Amino acid sequence: MKTIGLIGGMSWESSAEYYRLINLLVKKRLGGHANAKSLMLTVNFAEIEAWQREQNWENLASEMASAARKLQSGGADCILLCTNTMHKVADTIQSAVSIPLLHIADATALAVRGARITVPGLLGTRFTMEDGFYQDHFRASHALQVMTPPLQEDREFVHRAIYEELCQGILKEETRDEFCRIIQRLIQGGADGIILGCTELGLLLRAEDATVPVLDSTEIHVRAAVDYAMSDAT
């Protein structure tokens, strides 16, 4: 089994979910006392969040690249970035190491195709929804178009809920209700599936919160990592 290198801490709540889900899946597949071989390097989310607000992507890219190099030096066979937003600097991360970065958008796009979703609606941070890197990756690598909430107030609500509640471990029923309304507006606009494109969203939302398939990018990313760790790929 290969060793999975995880860049975590963005937030630690979702990173803990990554660790839990990876080991549950390995145990399910291998049984007994089996668990994944892994390394996790956690960054300080307070620093990351401040650089994001300042749009200081140069510092963010440097921090992610440094984390990836440390994981490779520690024996990791692949890199798993436990966040959607920071895949904005995925190219810099990959160029810093010789082991593969398992891109969350690749894994999610394959799951979208597998579910026969043609127009996925994307929920995530403002950066994920508005900066285009996620949508560009879907379009360039997988010929898929992605919808985001058309109303700015909806995008702002999703962004605030992620940073002010979910990243703090706060789960509110009224927040879930508002997410459901935003999801319903995406469906009315033509979305035939919903991507939970933030690693914290799966802590709040479930499949039953929509009338179309809901794809949790965290769970999808985890499956891709375990598949790779248990494969013969190099």
Image (tube, rainbow, N blue to C red):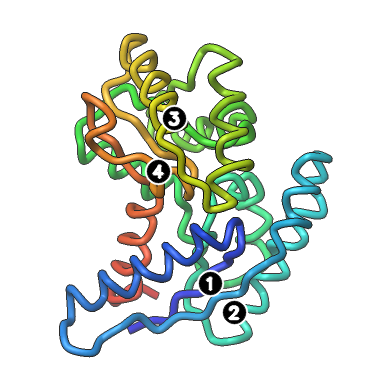
Q: In terms of depth relative to the viewer, which is nearer, 159 or 192?
A: 159
Q: Residue at x 61, y 52 (%)?
A: 90
* Residue hosting label 1: 99
Is residue 6 placed above or below 176 in the rendered structure?
A: below
Q: Residue at x 46, y 60 (%)?
A: 102
User: Mark 4, mark 2: which one is toward the viewer?
Assistant: 4
Residues at marks 1 and 3, CA–CA distance in whole angstroms: 43 Å
- Could you classify mark 2 by the number of other residues whose Cα lies within 10 Å: few (under 14), some (14-19), or many (20 or more)? many
Q: Position of residue 158 (x, y in %)?
A: 54, 30
* Residue hosting label 2: 72
User: Mark 3, mark 4: which one is toward the viewer?
Assistant: 3
* Residue hosting label 3: 174
The kind of residue tagged 1 is Ile
The earlier-in-sequence mark between 4 and 2 is 2
The earlier-in-sequence mark between 1 and 3 is 1
Residues at marks 2 and 1, CA–CA distance in whole angstroms: 7 Å
Quick one: SS at disc 2?
helix
Quarter of the figure with the C terminus: bottom left
Q: In terms of depth relative to the viewer, which is nearer, 50 or 224?
A: 50
* Residue hosting label 4: 204
